[in-house]
Image: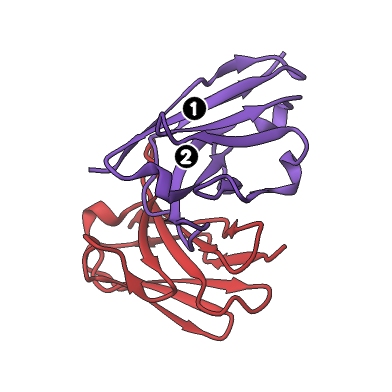
Amino acid sequence: QVYMVESGGGVVQPGTSLRLSCAASGFTFGNYAMHWVRQAPGKGLEWVAVIWYNESNKKYVDSVKGRFTISRDNSKNTLYLQMNSLRAEDTAVYYCARGGLYSSGWYFDYWGQGILVIVSS
Amino acid sequence: DIQMTQSPSSLSASVGDRVTITCRASQTISSYLNWYQQTPGKAPKLLIYSASSLQSGVPSRFSGSESGTDFTLTISSLQPEDFAIYYCQQSYSFPWTFGQGTKVEIK
């Protein structure tokens, strides 16, 4: 079955960097767009970024543009989120989520269990 | 950005009740509207996609409908496992945005 597990979270100081990973299995990873969605503690959901199946297109929410980079390694069935210049407001549980076949798709049909990132001095 | 506004923010209901949650988009989004359920400490789960299509494996007591820029999630007979937070989400244009959530609590 479809399974995704995030890793790389933790507690970091403002202004530093962190790279999240999402290891996927149970489907042909290289055929699907993948997303990152985050949820600040006690708050709602916020879409962060998407990457097309072949990295031909990437999109970001304005609040992370220029600081976060989404990427993937289809040979390793792994999605990444490089987060630079972290701010306190980036504190959240980060979920990877599956998008559509080849393009962004229209919904998130499978989600990882989430990984917590805390940005604090 | 397209704003999604859910109502109510929370509601109390009893097992067996019919529950309706509404989501309004700030502009047209066609039928690019999805509904998710989230229980404490868990990842969201897709319930309804494209406004009214039931995701595989989701009980038929869940249904979705649309009227213009207003969308509705209905639970026909609330079950104990349905007490959760429900989110709508538009995928008409980037950035994809979510409603603020509706918490369904036990009366």
- Are there few (<14), some (14-19), or many (20+) residues within 10 Å of tag 1? many
Q: Please state if A115 lies on the left or on the right of B92 as rendered.
A: left
Q: What residue type is labelled 2?
A: Cys
Q: Cα distance, mark 2 to mark 1?
A: 9 Å
Identified at 42% across, 32% down, the residue is A75
* Residue nearest the viewer, comparing A57 with A91: A57
Mark 2 and mark 1 lie on one chain; the one further toward the N terminus is 1
Q: Please state if B48 lies on the left or on the right of A17 as rendered.
A: left
Query: Residue tagged by mark 1?
Result: A21
The local secondary structure at tag 2 comes to strand
* Residue nearest the viewer, comparing B79 with B14: B79
Which percent across, then down, holds residue A58?
Answer: 64, 48
**Chain letter behind tag 1:** A
Which percent across, then down, holds residue A100?
Answer: 44, 57
Q: Which amino acid does label 1 sit on?
A: Ser
- Chain B, hue in figure: red
The local secondary structure at tag 1 comes to strand
Judging by colour alone, the chain drawn in purple in this rendered image is: A
* Quarter of the rendering containing residue A25: top left
